Amino acid sequence: MSAHHESEPKLYRYSRTVCGVFTQVLCALFSVFITVLSRPGSSLFSWHPFLMTLAFSFFMTEAILLFNPYSSPIKKLKHKTKGRLHWILQGLCVCCAAAGLAAIFYNKSLNDKPHFTSWHGLIGVLTVSVVGLQSLGGLPLLYPKLAKGWSLAKLKRYHAASGLLTYLLGSLSLFLGLCSAWFSSSVSGYVWYLAVLCPVLCALVVMNQVTNAYMARKPMQY
């Protein structure tokens, strides 16, 4: 942990640590809950909620929380190592999201149903496209030789800002999925509200982490 964080009040640091750990546990439990509910392999459709939740609730959330200075399980490792692990998790996120999109596309085609007619479908396909581009955009940070003529400091801030927007898109897609007929017919009452809180709370924690790390810093000098 940096000297800046060491100088912060202990209560503040402990609360941030607890919040980060809670978020990691929450996204894992939410992913397990959707896995049990969807029973992947029971039908072609079942792969869609399972893979999309794994992509955006687990892999993408964990990829960002790796950089949490308070609760990251690898906070003592070098930033370069964190960056590589981050990109691996993001790669897994892209693979799961693409497979989840393919599953629902093929399922609708088999059942002669129209594609992308709901907000969930439209936001979902947009999110999958954006997360793929976001992962490619992170390559110059892994391999600085690709960032010819660009400041790495600026690229990090641009990548963080676009990454936050991508994560919020993923959270919105998950939220809309929880409002779908499939999920609403599978759970009800307080369970539905608890499930909806999961992507919302995770999004708030990630947004706070990214804004504190990058957006709140002094403006870049051009």
Image (cartoon, rainbow, N blue to C red):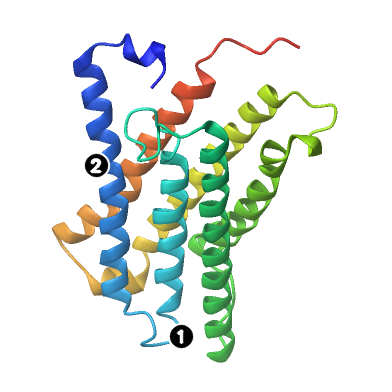
Residue type, label 2: Phe
Q: In the rendered image of this protein, does residue 160 appear above or below residue 12?
A: below
Front one among 73 and 172: 73
Q: Which residue is mark 2?
A: 22
Report the mark closest to the observer, 2 or 1. Answer: 2
Q: Residue furthest front?
A: 77
Residue 72: x and y in percent read: 36, 37
Front one among 11 and 105: 11
Q: In the rendered image of this protein, does residue 104 appear above or below residue 164?
A: below
Horizontal side of residue 44 vs 162, given as left or right: left
User: Local crowd at mark 2 within 10 Å, few (<14), some, or many (≥20)?
Assistant: some
Residue 52: x and y in percent read: 46, 64
SS for tag 2? helix
Q: Is residue 201 visible?
A: yes
Residue type, label 1: Leu
Q: In the rendered image of this protein, does residue 168 appear above or below residue 12?
A: below
Q: Residue furthest left?
A: 190
Q: CA distance from mark 2 to mark 1?
A: 32 Å
Q: Quadrant of residue 49?
A: bottom left
Residue 161: x and y in percent read: 58, 32
Q: Who's the residue at 71% across and 9% down the image?
A: 221
Residue 28: x and y in percent read: 30, 56
Which disc, if any, is residue 44? 1
Q: Quadrant of residue 147?
A: top right
Q: Who's the residue at 24% across and 18% down the image?
A: 12
Q: Is residue 197 visible?
A: no
